[in-house]
Amino acid sequence: MALQLRSLSYALGAEVRDVDISQPLSESAFGEIHRAFLDHGILLFRGRRLLREQHIEFSRRFGALD
């Protein structure tokens, strides 16, 4: 999967396009998202409606939650 990103500013943030994070992601797809997070610091996923459980499941892939 080739992740489509649009920078939000010169220094920080990117919009991730054409990825539905409400659905299960393969390890390689999540790896691309994780790399983008490390590169940009903030990721924006527009137009996605997530249930609380889906948000938690996606977020846990980044590490332990508080």
Image (cartoon, grey):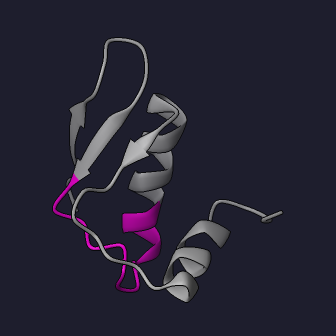
> Residue sitting at 40 percent across and 85 percent down?
24
Magenta-highlighted residues: 17-30
> Residue sitting at 36 percent across and 81 percent down?
22
Can I make out residue 47 in this image? yes
- Residue 59 at what x, y percent from top left? 60, 67
Q: Is residue 55 above or below residue 15?
A: below
Tell me, yes or no, whether the highlighted magenta stretch contains residue 25.
yes
The quarter of the image holding the N terminus is bottom left
Residue 36: name its quadrant.
top left
Q: Is residue 12 above or below residue 66?
A: above
Tell me, yes or no, whether the highlighted magenta stretch contains residue 38.
no
- Relative to residue 17, is residue 43 drawn left or right? right
Point out the residue furthest to the top here. Answer: 10
- Residue 60 at what x, y percent from top left? 67, 71
The quarter of the image holding the C terminus is bottom right
> Residue sitting at 35 percent across and 85 percent down?
23
Can I make out residue 3 in this image? no
Q: Is residue 20 above or below residue 46?
A: below
- Residue 13 at what x, y percent from top left? 39, 30
- Relative to residue 31, is residue 44 drawn left or right? left
Tell how many labels: 0
Q: Is residue 51 above or below residue 36?
A: below
- Residue 47 at what x, y percent from top left? 21, 64
- Relative to residue 20, is residue 60 drawn left or right? right
Between 42 and 63, the one lying in front of the other is 42
Main secondary-structure element of the magenta-colored stretch: loop
